[in-house]
Amino acid sequence: MYDFTADLDQPKSEFYRELVSAADALTAGEPDAVANMANVAALVWQLVPELNWAGFYRVIGDELVLGPFCGRPACIRIPFGSGVCGTAAQSGESQLVADVHAFPGHIACDAASQSELVVPVIRDGAVIAVIDLDSPRTSRFDEDDLAGFTALAGILASRI
């Protein structure tokens, strides 16, 4: 049994160090990508405040396909270059969006979403998945969140 907790009063850098460490413990030695994505999505959902969606989209061919997540039902397929997730997958660059309604081509899977952070998971120079986080609050994500989820994506690159 795993029991992870987080102190939200600590600096974000320490919070994310602990989150990455917990994700490392959950996924170390487990070869099943779906199991690892599912556990990490649940961990993020449990520990990161002010989210209404947390999970993965997997790269299959030239599109993203829904992977394990926590939140309301979501779009199943997203073409590269479409919306925040598709833009991150196509460019290989993280997308930190303070107001999703101002993002050209935003795909509204959940009308409650106001801000979004999408971080590509890159293995051998290719995007294999994206970590997608939505919040019902505008400007929810900042550079500290981006750095923390970039570190998480680095750990997961060889495990999903």
Image (spheres, rainbow, N blue to C red):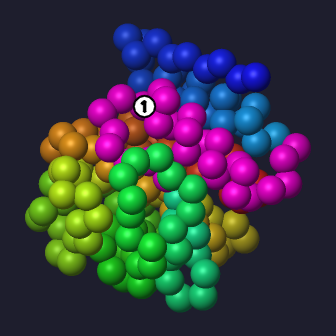
Quadrant the N terminus occupies: top right
Q: Dot 1 lies on which element?
A: loop
> Magenta span covers which residues?
29-55
Is residue 39 rendered magenta in the image? yes
Q: Is residue 130 above or below residue 31?
A: below
Q: Residue furthest bottom?
A: 62
Q: Residue furthest front?
A: 73
Total numbered circles: 1
Quarter of the image where one finds residue 59: bottom right
Residue at 67%, 29% in the rendered image: 21
Is residue 88 rendered magenta in the image? no
- Label 1 sits on what residue type? Val
Residue 151 falls left or right of residue 97:
right
Residue identified by numbered label 1: 48
Q: Nearer the viewer, residue 16 or 71?
A: 71
Expressed as whole percent of the image width and height from the top left, the position of residue 155 reads 69, 47
Quadrant the C terminus occupies: bottom right
Residue at 42%, 31% in the rendered image: 48
Q: Is residue 118 above or below residue 52?
A: below
Residue at 49%, 30% in the rendered image: 46
